Image: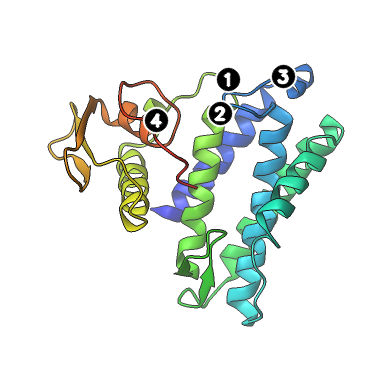
């Protein structure tokens, strides 16, 4: 399903971006600390960064997503200053290029590294982009919510974030109980906090977008 989710998520993000007026680019988006221009620049440069991983997988030449965290942040800051028309074009072009490169990739077992230094097979690259476009479509603030995501995608996102936090021993310990699912999710540990809601609400919360009462969460990406 990942490739289908990627294509659907890219369309969703770009369609929602078309609804955002130029005047809103300088205003805050739903992701704290960023304007819409920052969000769009990040989404565009994330596609370029993942294209570097595709190149790494295709050629065997190590081409990291970013030279450093500081370089990534500086690139976003500079990108946010671009004229709105250029930003709109940039995010479309980089997204289209990445998806074309993924369609041409054959060695899905080639090992690459995420921006956090985690070694993963190239087959994870489409999922890395899928997370970005779906979640940031919400961050644009046009009215799309996690409840609009496919049911299976919601479950996959929760499982992914829970798994990442668990693998990094990144607390707090949690038990996530979904009112519309027969099974839940947990991050093991002493005295886990129980967080309840629909799966979409839990997904929004575990992805750092609030909406439920629960312990403070650190960054997961």
Mark toward the start of the polypeptide (2 vs 3): 3
Circle 4 SS class: helix
Q: Which residue has dot 4 on it? A: 204
Q: Which residue is mark 2?
A: 139
**Which labelled disc corresponds to residue 142?**
1
Work out which residue is located at the far bottom of the displayed protein and give it: 60
Residue occupying image coordinates x 76% and y 36%: 88
Q: Nearer the viewer, mark 1 or mark 4?
A: 4
Q: Please, what secondary structure does the residue beneath circle 3 have?
A: loop
Disc number lying in front (1 or 2): 2
Q: Are marks 1 and 2 in contact (CB under 8 Å)?
A: no
14 lies above or below 48: above
Task: Give x and y (percent) for residue 9.
Answer: 52, 41
Label 3 or label 1, whichever comes before in sequence order: 3
Q: Nearer the viewer, mark 3 or mark 1?
A: 3
What is the C-alpha distance between the residues marked 1 and 2? 8 Å
The location of residue 140, given as percent across then percent down, is 60, 26
Q: Which mark is residue 4?
A: none
Earlier-in-chain disc, 4 versus 2: 2
| Image location of residue 198, percent across then percent down | 26, 26
Mark 1 or 4 closer to N-term? 1
Residue position marked by numbered label 3 in the rendering: 27
Q: Residues within 10 Å of mark 1 (few under 14, many from 20)?
A: some
> Going by the image, does 170 lie left or right of 104?
left
Q: Nearer the viewer, residue 122 or 9?
A: 122
Dividing the picture into quarters, in which one does residue 104 lie? bottom right
């Amino acid at each position: 399903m990942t490739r289908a989710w990627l294509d659907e998520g890219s369309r969703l993000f770009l369609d929602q971006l078309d609804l955002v007026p130029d005047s809103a680019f300088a205003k805050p988006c739903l992701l704290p600390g960023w304007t819409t221009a920052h969000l769009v620049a990040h989404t565009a440069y994330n596609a370029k960064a993942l294209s570097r991983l595709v190149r790494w997988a295709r050629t065997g030449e190590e081409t990291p997503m970013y030279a450093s965290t500081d370089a990534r942040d500086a690139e976003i800051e500079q990108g946010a200053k671009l004229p709105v028309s250029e930003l709109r074009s940039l995010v479309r072009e980089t997204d289209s290029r990445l998806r074309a490169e993924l369609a041409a990739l054959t060695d899905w077992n080639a090992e690459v590294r995420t921006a956090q230094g985690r070694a993963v097979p190239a087959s994870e690259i489409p999922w890395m982009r899928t997370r970005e476009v779906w979640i940031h479509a919400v961050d644009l603030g046009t009215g799309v919510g996690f409840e609009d995501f496919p049911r299976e995608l919601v479950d996959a996102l929760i499982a992914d974030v829970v798994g990442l936090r668990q693998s990094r021993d990144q607390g707090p310990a949690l038990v996530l109980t979904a009112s519309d699912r027969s099974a839940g999710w947990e991050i093991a540990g002493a005295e886990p906090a129980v967080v309840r809601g629909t799966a979409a609400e839990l997904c929004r919360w575990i992805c750092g977008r609030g909406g439920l009462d629960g312990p403070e969460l650190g960054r997961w990406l």
